Image (tube, grey):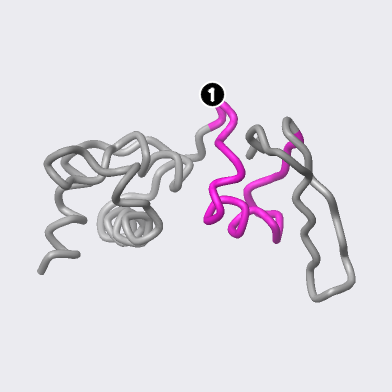
């Protein structure tokens, strides 16, 4: 479940130009809602606390973390050492990960 963060004005989402919906601070949407991915990319929502989904395993986990790294803002979501923060990655992914999984994904990204 995703919760909309504080915003100055409502966010309007139109799916294929027909399903126009308006979201305000505190509104909730499911992870599989068609608006969820865009709302996450635009940093309009946060994961509801205590509602983490189950993490994939093995290569599927690392692939997911690699994809999440690409969605982060380096100025805000990386440490001073230039490493993506585990917390920021978990916010994008919607499940908990280890620093080891982050490091393995970072190795793939950096080749």
The quarter of the picture where the N terminus appears is top right
Q: Residue furthest bottom?
A: 16
The span shown in magenta is: 27-51
Q: Residue at x 75, y 50 (%)?
A: 11
Neighbours of disc 1 within 10 Å: few (<14), some (14-19), many (20+): few
Task: Locate residue 16, reporting x and y percent.
Answer: 80, 75
Lateral position of residue 56 relative to residue 40, left or right: left
User: Helix, strand, or loop for circle 1?
Assistant: loop
| Vertical placement of residue 70 versus 93, above or below | below
Lateral position of residue 81 relative to residue 57, left or right: left
Task: Locate residue 99, reporting x and y percent.
Answer: 20, 37
| Residue 59 among magenta residues | no
| Residue of label 1 | 50
Q: Residue at x 34, y 42 (%)?
A: 76
| Vertical placement of residue 35 versus 97, above or below | below
Lateral position of residue 26 relative to residue 65, left or right: right
Task: Locate residue 43, reporting x and y percent.
Answer: 54, 47
Q: Residue at x 37, y 35 (%)?
A: 96
Q: Residue at x 84, y 74 (%)?
A: 17
The quarter of the picture where the C terminus appears is bottom left
């Amino acid at each position: 479940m995703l919760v909309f963060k504080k915003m100055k004005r409502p966010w309007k989402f139109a799916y294929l130009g027909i399903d126009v919906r308006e979201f305000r601070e505190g509104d909730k949407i499911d992870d599989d809602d068609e608006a969820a991915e865009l709302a996450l990319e635009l940093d309009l929502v946060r994961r509801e606390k205590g509602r983490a989904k189950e993490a994939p395993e093995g290569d599927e986990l690392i692939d997911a973390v690699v994809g999440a790294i690409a969605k982060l803002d380096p100025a805000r979501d990386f440490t001073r050492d230039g490493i993506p923060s585990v917390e920021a990655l978990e916010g994008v992914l919607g499940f908990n990960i280890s620093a080891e999984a982050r490091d393995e994904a970072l190795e793939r990204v950096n080749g």
